[in-house]
Amino acid sequence: MVRNDDKTSGVAVIDCKKILALIVLCGWVSSAAAEDACLASAQSGLERLYCEIVARGEGRGLPSPADFKRNDPQVQALLLRRPAARLGLSVPASSPAPSPTATAPADRLSDPTVEPAPTPPSPSARRSANDRAQSPVAPDRQSGLSGCQLAGEVIDCPNRRLVLASNQANRELQPGALAAGNTLSLASFQGDRRDAEVVRRYLSGAYDVYILKMLAIGLGANTMSFTAFHHAFHSLEDGGVDFAQRMEQTYRLLKEDKKTLAVKARYHNELPQSLAWCVSINREVVVCDNVGTNWVFTAAP
């Protein structure tokens, strides 16, 4: 189903399924990139279009050529849509990229000296590990879902009921949700990244803020899993990029696109299969994921 409340004739539909790629790769185009070198290395219509856009002076806000290629075709098309429209160029059709869980990075497969990326915790583990440090609560209560039952698009709990969140039209948002004053405002990480527990505590708190902020702009059906969030953190920090600052840039980009683009209520029909996949952020919000797919449930009115 597509929400048409904010959709005008000819307006493209925003697809936020690849938010992780936008977070990692929404840097600025390098002015030193040579145009012919760009075209010589282009391997697809989207990559050639990228080179033409940059050559014609509309590359502001696009990733560098190398970073652009690391995005899947769907994200490449999304990034090129606006500058291509300004030049009157059409964007080639894109097809979904393979699931990121299906393959491993080539350098980690071919070079045994490359240290593997830290293994992200499961949804329940990332919460219970923190809670155990606070209180010896039984594991079935650490997630805040004791006595709850998962039934498709509904989680029934004692004295509360949560339903699967859909993306919302702009008219359904709170006033000012898409304004500049609504920021993500994550604190930059200041600890030792070699300390897995310190990182987990930081990311757990930051992830809760991220989920609530995505709901605030009506994108509850397009959130990253905690695994993806964890991966983005390490990828960015490894590259010398402040994770919190890049997240802020991405949140601003999503708000701008949300102002002008329609959103689908959901982008797939999958549903979580077990409550073990779920963690309670607060009494009104529960997040479930199977590493690759994320679901957010919110308290029913």
Image (cartoon, rainbow, N blue to C red):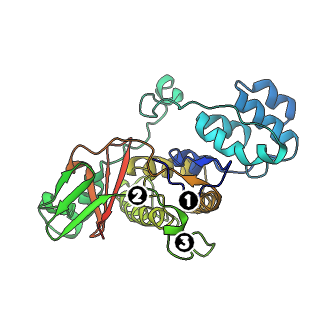
Going from the N terminus, do you reach mark 3 or mark 1 first?
3
Q: Which residue is mark 3?
A: 177
Task: Find residue 199 and name its label.
Answer: 2
On the rendered image, what quadrant is the C terminus found in?
bottom left
Residue 82 visible from this viewpoint: yes
Q: In terms of secondary structure, where does tag 2 sit?
A: helix
* Between 196 and 151, the one nearer to me in the picture: 151
Q: In terms of secondary structure, where does tag 1 sit?
A: helix
Q: Residue at x 35, y 51 (%)?
A: 295
Examine the image and state in which quarter residue 102 appears: top left
Question: Label 3: how many residues lie within 10 Å, few (<14), some (14-19) or many (20+)?
Answer: some
Question: Label 2: how many residues lie within 10 Å, few (<14), some (14-19) or many (20+)?
Answer: some
Q: Residue at x 15, y 59 (%)?
A: 148
* Between 207 and 49, the one nearer to me in the picture: 49
Residue 187 visible from this viewpoint: no
Going from the N terminus, do you reach mark 2 or mark 3 first?
3
Q: Is residue 108 above or below residue 259?
A: above
How far is mark 2 from mark 3, CA to CA?
Answer: 29 Å
Q: Is residue 255 left or right of residue 59?
A: left
* Between 268 and 230, the one nearer to me in the picture: 268
> How far across and how far down the image is residue 42, in percent?
74, 27
- Residue type at the position of mark 3: Ala
Q: Which residue is mark 1?
A: 247
- Residue type at the position of mark 2: Val
